[in-house]
Image (cartoon, rainbow, N blue to C red):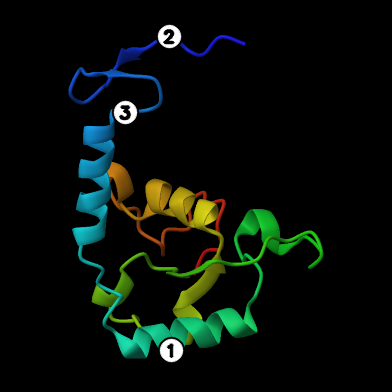
Amino acid sequence: MPSRAPRACPRCGNKIIGRSCATCAARWRTKQANRPDPYKDDTRWTRLAAAYRKQHPFCECERHRDLPDHLRPRSQVVDHIDGLGLDGPRAYDWHNLQALTRRCHAIKTAQHDGGYGRTRTDPSDPARTSPMRSG
């Protein structure tokens, strides 16, 4: 079976066969490795998130929470419902947390928490239509 025809890298214009050229891929990996993680050095958050996931092993988003446990995906991250993270006044409040899969977390971040350049929605707004659990 013939392989895909070479095309131009969307970043630098070099010829590639996959998503990007080797130079751009290496640059991206370096950038990601050097990116600061606000949760990395916060021992209190690390312990709280681990304890929360231990008690809530399955995804708690609205789409998954009504399924029986054997059909629900396992949680991978702990999310702040209010979307403020460690900067918010309820950063370590157990009732402000929800366990999500990475995919459900990305969806929530993109739609409600101001991710990807979007404006943040107010979590206390009753008109907010969310596929995730509201606070």
Q: Residue at x 82, y 65 (%)?
A: 70
Please, is residue 74 above or below residue 92 in the view?
above
Q: Which residue is drawn at 66% across and 69% down?
A: 58
Mark 1 residue crowding within 10 angstroms, few (<14) / some (14–19) / many (20+): few
Question: Could you say where residue 111 lies in the image, as x and y percent from the top left?
Answer: 41, 47
Is the C-beta separation of discs 2 and 3 under 8 Å? no
Please, is residue 35 above or below residue 118 in the view?
below
Mark carried by residue 5: 2
Q: Earlier in the sequence, mark 2 or mark 3?
A: 2
Q: Please state which amino acid type lies under the numbered disc 1.
A: Arg
Q: Which of marks 1 and 3 is nearer the N terminus?
A: 3
Q: Distance between the residues labelled 2 and 1?
A: 49 Å
Dot 3 corresponds to which residue?
20
Q: Can residue 36 be seen in this view?
A: yes
Q: Distance between the residues labelled 2 and 3?
A: 14 Å
Q: Which residue is drawn at 21% across and 34% down?
A: 23
Q: How far apart are marks 1 and 3 (CA)?
A: 38 Å
Which quadrant does the N terminus fall into?
Answer: top right
Total labels: the figure holds 3
Question: Could you say where residue 9 lies in the image, as x and y percent from the top left?
Answer: 27, 21
In what element is the residue under mark 2? loop
Dot 1 corresponds to which residue?
47
Work out which residue is located at the far front of the displayed protein and give it.
1
Q: Can residue 93 be seen in this view?
A: no
